[in-house]
């Protein structure tokens, strides 16, 4: 699956393990949360990078205790209109200090890339050909003036550092 | 029940009806009257191309009553779409009738 | 009033470029209709029965003459010469072409207006008391806070794809003219016992198919926490609100299903957990924004106006106009003038380009350059000297804008209904027109007194029928329009939802049914001063039900 990260398409270092499929406890796999919860002891003595896939509706509290074990969290966007992952992403970054890869998977479309970036996503699995074509031209449509600071956007000095952000 | 296929034109949103030659026309009197569900299904299949080509949106068939030359939508909503707002006789398609 | 600085102007220009690009991508086929719909809605563009509809935000209902003239220009140039003021302090144009909309938005941007988030599952146009900054009973002008909320909620990256639409309303007075208890969040400015200003906060109100009155979630929220607390509420909603059924997706359903106490606990926990001070409002910023809303310097005038009294004595129609349409201003010698957009038999909320231009001119000449739009679909000149009322009245009368019915039975709120709206199940406007003609604005209307009739053409309740003293809901039964009545609703501080009378009435009979309700009220009121709502609250449904239904069954025997 094409993976867009840091402004270009990159080789995906990770393998996604579908629900219900067996796997050997190697690293760089993205597993469903239920799998992780059931099989985690297999990783007790291992330090391989693990990714977890979080379906919308799963509360952060359900996996927060294991956050330090995850090098990657994939948040599922079942429909592009489903905005739950935006809050989850911000909370992971801002409140829980998650520093690993935050990947958007599912229906990820071109016009949602900018708000997702602003909520702390940094990687995007792209399935929509129009989105892929647009991203390949280096184009992320959006706006350049914001009334809210986004994740990792340091407030700028000025009249209203708490509210306004100009430039990308 | 006879039916007519209507849609809105993508570029300006104006209500249009499908004519027998496949064109989209603005007045109901120029629309093709489809006598049964088989004809409606066949016409809707053809319309798929127009939807894919982004000419029209909101395509739907609606019931009409035909009396001689006169075609009248059965439901109030479709009557209003075919004529214009009941409160503004000067606006909508009724202005040109 | 608020003026854009360079940042605001650049923001709107940015958004316009983004949307113009989306329109081009839609017209070229790069975006499907499903993908485009969400963007057009978030920029105020609907597809209605006849054409596209463009809904333009009038934040907290405040307009300058220059802006109103621009709306008149848009009505003339891109539409059919009129616009429709809505129940959420927006204006709608009913016939714009999609390909023209970027140009229209460009025209709006030139007068610091936009259509951002007037639809879509996001935080909508922030509304406020239309008498803000002028009402005699006001604690503080709520509009600076409304403006801060407007800015903060504009293209909010986290809250652009909420489960459903989200509406905020603010009131600065104890008498609630902004219907805050039927909004997703309502904010009421209050003073605590230390004399500090803050907000009583209501959450989970809303109309639609499952109407609910909001719960008071905070008695007193310090003003500096306005954004942080709002963020906490919206975040809980975004994460937990239902997305499986759009009819159960509003926050009111979450509050109902989760339970109010659990909701309050979740919001307070989220608010506490957010240690970031980023959203705390600095007092300096509140003061900076408030300066834009500083009241105009109104020269001192005598409380009694000789010019007004002289004219009143000789002109009965003028006297009625002043008695009904002028409300108490906080400064002596001035009035708040409601310009009714409810001419007898007319379309509630419609204004022609010429009417808009006249109101703009009057605001310049006599109104300190300010116009308000009320959720009751009228216009307001908030600062008119009583001495100027004769001249203002004459000018309004010449354009058919001097109907003396503000707050009376013919001052009807009505959604567009099936004449325009693709969601409607019945017509609303012609029902309003017929009721208006039946009761008019003469002595009979005055005798009936304060009466709010509100009409919706479907269960989405854009006409706020649940909070009408008499509410009318248009439905479709077996292909025929039928109208259900509710009685005793109120959208003010004593907020209640109306009770359904019983089976609905036909399009033909509904006006007679309203007359039966009104006559029943007249017959049972304790004194001529007891208004309909008070009388209903005293006697309940029974006498009205009896009058509406037993008479009919009797006649069949």
Image: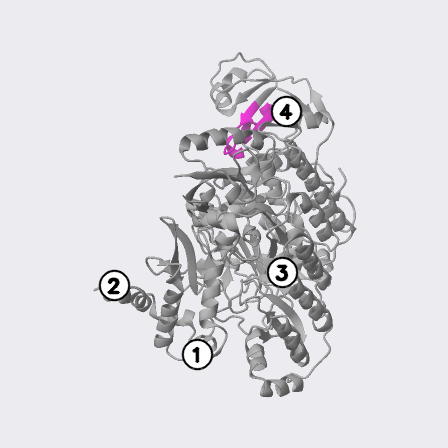
Percent x, y for residue C135?
61, 70
| Mark 2 and mark 3 on one chain | yes
| Mark 3 and mark 1 on one chain | yes
Circle 4 crowding by C-alpha within 10 Å: few under 14, some 14–19, many from 20:
few
Q: CA distance from mark 1 to mark 4?
A: 69 Å
Chain designation of label 3? C
Residue at point 43% right, 43% down?
Answer: B64
Question: Which numbered disc covers residue A129?
Answer: 4
Residue bearing mark 3: C61
The magenta stretch is: A52-77
Q: Is residue A59 magenta?
A: yes
> Mark 4 falls on what kind of element?
helix
> Mark 1 falls on what kind of element?
loop
Q: Is residue C527 magenta?
A: no
Query: Mark 4 and mark 1 in contact (Cβ < 8 Å)?
Result: no
Percent x, y for residue C271?
57, 47
Q: CA distance from mark 4 to mark 3?
A: 43 Å
Precedes in sequence: disc 3 or disc 1: 3
Residue C457 versus residue B19: which sits nearer the camera? B19
Circle 3 crowding by C-alpha within 10 Å: few under 14, some 14–19, many from 20:
many
Circle 1 crowding by C-alpha within 10 Å: few under 14, some 14–19, many from 20:
few
Q: Is A146 placed above or below C361 here?
A: above
Query: Mark 1 and mark 3 in contact (Cβ < 8 Å)?
Result: no
Question: Which numbered disc covers residue C529?
Answer: 1
């Amino acid at each position: 699956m094409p993976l867009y990260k840091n402004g270009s398409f990159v080789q995906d270092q990770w393998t996604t393990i579908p629900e219900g499929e067996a796997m050997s406890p190697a690293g760089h796999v993205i597993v469903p949360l239920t799998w992780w919860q059931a099989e985690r002891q297999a990783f007790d003595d291992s330090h391989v990078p693990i990714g977890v896939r979080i379906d919308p509706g799963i509360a952060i509290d359900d996996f927060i205790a294991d956050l330090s074990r995850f090098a990657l969290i994939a948040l599922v966007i079942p429909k592009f209109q489903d905005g739950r992952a935006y809050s989850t992403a911000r909370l992971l970054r801002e409140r829980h200090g998650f520093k690993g890869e935050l990947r958007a998977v599912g229906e990820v479309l071109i016009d949602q890339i900018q708000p997702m970036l602003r909520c702390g996503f940094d990687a995007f699995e792209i399935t929509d050909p129009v989105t892929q074509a647009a991203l390949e031209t280096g184009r992320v449509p959006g706006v350049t003036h914001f009334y809210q600071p986004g994740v990792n956007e340091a407030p700028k000095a000025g009249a209203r550092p708490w509210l306004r952000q100009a430039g990308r | 029940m006879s039916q007519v296929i209507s849609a809105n034109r993508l570029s300006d949103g104006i209500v249009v009806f499908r004519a027998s030659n496949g064109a989209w026309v603005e007045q109901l009197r120029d629309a093709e009257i489809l006598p049964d569900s088989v004809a409606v299904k066949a016409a809707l299949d053809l319309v798929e191309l127009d939807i894919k080509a982004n000419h029209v949106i909101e395509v739907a068939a609606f019931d009409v009553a035909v009396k001689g030359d006169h075609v009248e939508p059965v439901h109030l909503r479709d009557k209003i779409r075919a004529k214009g707002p009941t409160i503004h006789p000067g606006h909508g398609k009724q202005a040109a009738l | 009033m608020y003026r854009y600085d360079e940042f605001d102007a650049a923001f709107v220009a940015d958004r316009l470029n983004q949307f113009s690009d989306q329109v081009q991508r839609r017209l070229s086929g790069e975006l499907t209709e499903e993908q485009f719909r969400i963007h057009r809605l978030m920029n105020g563009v609907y597809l209605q029965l006849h054409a596209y509809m463009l809904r333009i935000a009038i934040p907290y209902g405040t307009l300058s003459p220059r802006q109103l003239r621009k709306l008149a220009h848009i009505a003339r140039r891109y539409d059919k010469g009129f616009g429709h003021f809505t129940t959420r302090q927006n204006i709608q144009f009913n016939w714009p072409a999609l390909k023209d909309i970027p140009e229209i938005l460009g025209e709006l941007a030139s007068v610091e207006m936009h259509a951002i988030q007037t639809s879509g599952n996001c935080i909508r146009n922030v509304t406020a008391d239309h008498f803000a900054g002028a009402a005699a009973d006001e604690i503080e002008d709520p509009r600076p806070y409304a403006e801060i909320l407007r800015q903060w909620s504009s293209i909010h990256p986290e809250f652009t794809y909420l489960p459903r639409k989200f509406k905020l309303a603010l009131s600065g007075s104890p008498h609630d003219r902004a219907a805050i208890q039927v909004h997703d969040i309502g904010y009421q400015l209050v003073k605590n016992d230390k004399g500090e200003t803050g907000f009583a906060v209501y959450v989970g109100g809303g109309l639609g198919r499952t109407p609910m009155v909001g719960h008071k979630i905070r008695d007193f929220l310090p003003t500096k926490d306005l954004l942080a607390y709002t963020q906490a509420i919206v975040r809980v909603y975004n994460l937990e609100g239902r997305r499986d059924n759009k009819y159960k997706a509003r926050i009111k359903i979450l509050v109902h299903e989760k339970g109010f106490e659990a909701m309050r606990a979740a919001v307070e926990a989220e608010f506490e957990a957010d240690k970031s001070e980023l959203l705390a409002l600095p007092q300096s910023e509140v003061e900076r924004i408030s300066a834009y809303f500083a009241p105009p310097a109104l020269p001192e005038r005598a409380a009694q106006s000789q010019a007004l009294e002289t004219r009143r004595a000789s002109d009965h129609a003028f006297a009625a106009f002043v008695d009904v349409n002028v409300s108490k201003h906080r400064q002596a010698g001035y009035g708040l003038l409601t310009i009714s957009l409810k001419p007898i038999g007319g379309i509630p909320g419609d204004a022609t380009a010429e009417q808009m231009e006249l109101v703009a001119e009057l605001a310049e000449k006599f109104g300190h350059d300010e116009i308000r739009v009320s959720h009751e679909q009228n216009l307001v000149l908030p600062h008119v000297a009583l001495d100027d009322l004769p001249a203002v009245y004459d000018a309004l009368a010449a354009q058919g804008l001097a109907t003396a019915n503000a707050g009376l039975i013919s001052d009807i709120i009505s959604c567009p209904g099936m004449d325009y709206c693709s969601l409607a199940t019945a017509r609303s406007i012609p029902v309003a027109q017929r009721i208006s003609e039946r009761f008019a604005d003469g002595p009979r209307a005055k005798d009936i007194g304060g009466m709010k009739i509100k009409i919706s053409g479907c269960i989405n309740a854009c006409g706020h029928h649940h909070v009408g003293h008499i509410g009318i809901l248009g439905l479709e039964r077996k292909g025929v329009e039928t109208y259900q009545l509710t009685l005793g609703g109120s959208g003010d501080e004593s907020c209640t939802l109306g009770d359904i009378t019983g089976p609905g009435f036909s399009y033909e009979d509904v006006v007679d049914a309203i007359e039966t309700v009104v006559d029943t009220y007249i017959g049972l009121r304790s004194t001529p001063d007891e208004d309909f709502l008070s009388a209903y609250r005293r006697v309940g449904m029974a006498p009205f039900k009896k009058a509406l239904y037993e008479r009919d069954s009797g006649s069949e025997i």
